[in-house]
Amino acid sequence: MNILIIGANRGIGKALTDLCAAHQNWQVIGTSRDFDPELKRTENVWQVHCDITNQVSIKRMRQQLTTQFEQIDWLLNCAGILHTDAYMPEKALKQVNAQQLMDNYQTNAMGHLLLIQQLEPLFTSPSAKLIASVSARIGSIEDNHLGGWYAYRMSKAALNMGIKTLAIEWARTHPQVKFMLLHPGTTDTDLSNHFNKGYPKDSYKLRKIQPITY
Ligand SMILES: NC(=O)c1ccc[n+]([C@@H]2O[C@H](COP(=O)([O-])OP(=O)(O)OC[C@H]3O[C@@H](n4cnc5c(N)ncnc54)[C@H](OP(=O)(O)O)[C@@H]3O)[C@@H](O)[C@H]2O)c1
């Protein structure tokens, strides 16, 4: 079982990496923009650099992967941004700006889809496979009762539509691949730590994530 986890160095991706790595016979490949470009291995955990907004970086990662792996069984894409040092989520239209919209779209929507495009050859063998992208409830149009957070909401809605569209296409061409869009709920990570003050601590600790069974 080969599992590729995008965003394995922090937050939800790191928690999933630790849980998967506990299965000694699983090979877990984790990515981060802070890892080296060369594939490095410690026991059943591998590390490699990847920036999903950069096509050259994705191709380099794919080349590294294909030196060791003929196929990926699970792709768990945990990459996402909400805010940076330059901006926080917008509360009103007057705060909306092109840079924030573009950054969120590139990472949260475009990056997820273009990554799968580059990795397609690793998903073509007949065994069952899973591609999961961490989305967010906030990307639901029907569930939007609060407003605000334009760039993040729009990017997650776009992610949901992109993966749904791909699932329809690959149901015809690669029916062995199943897709999931995951809403993790508010989770105590760098992404959410400005916004989770009102939640009871135990409701969102990473240790609440349950081990995956396969
Ligand atoms: N925390 C929550 O309450 C919450 C709620 C709903 C949905 N989510 C979603 O859950 C996912 C994980 O978020 P988190 O809470 O774990 O946040 P986090 O701790 O801030 O982690 C964000 C992750 O995204 C990766 N990443 C960001 N930009 C990237 C890029 N261009 N290329 C590759 N990787 C990139 C980071 O990797 P490096 O910086 O190491 O490269 C990091 O691992 C996100 O998609 C987020 O939208 C979170």
Image: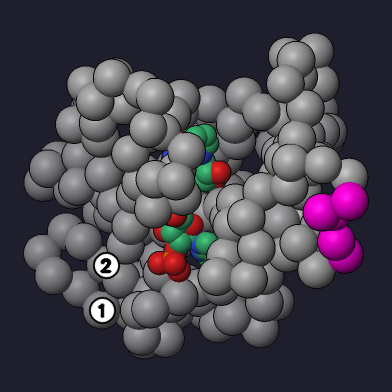
At x 70% / y 76%, what residue is drawn? 55
Query: Badge 2: few (under 14), some or many (20 or more) residues near its Cα, within 10 Å?
Result: some
Model colouring: one colour
In magenta stretch: residue 96: yes
Q: Nearer the viewer, residue 102 or 121?
A: 102
Image quadrant where one finds the C terminus: top left
Mark identifier at residue 46: 2
How far across and how far down the image is residue 14, in percent?
Answer: 29, 52
Secondary structure of the residue carrying numbered label 1 = strand
**What type is the residue that disc 1 sits on?**
Lys
Image quadrant where one finds the N terminus: top left
Magenta stretch: dominant SS? helix
**What type is the residue that disc 2 sits on?**
Trp
In magenta stretch: residue 33: no
Classify 153 as above or below 168: below
Classify 154 as above or below 113: above
How far across and how far down the image is residue 58, in percent?
Answer: 60, 73
* Residue 155 in view of the camera: no
Classify 127 as above or below 213: below
* Residue 174 in view of the camera: yes
**Highlighted range, magenta:** 94-98
Q: Earlier in the sequence, mark 1 or mark 2?
A: 1
Residue at the spot of label 1 = 40
Query: Badge 1: few (under 14), some or many (20 or more) residues near its Cα, within 10 Å?
Result: some
> Quick check: marks 1 and 2 in contact, CB under 8 Å?
yes
Q: Nearer the viewer, residue 14 or 22?
A: 14
At x 76% / y 62%, what residue is drawn? 100
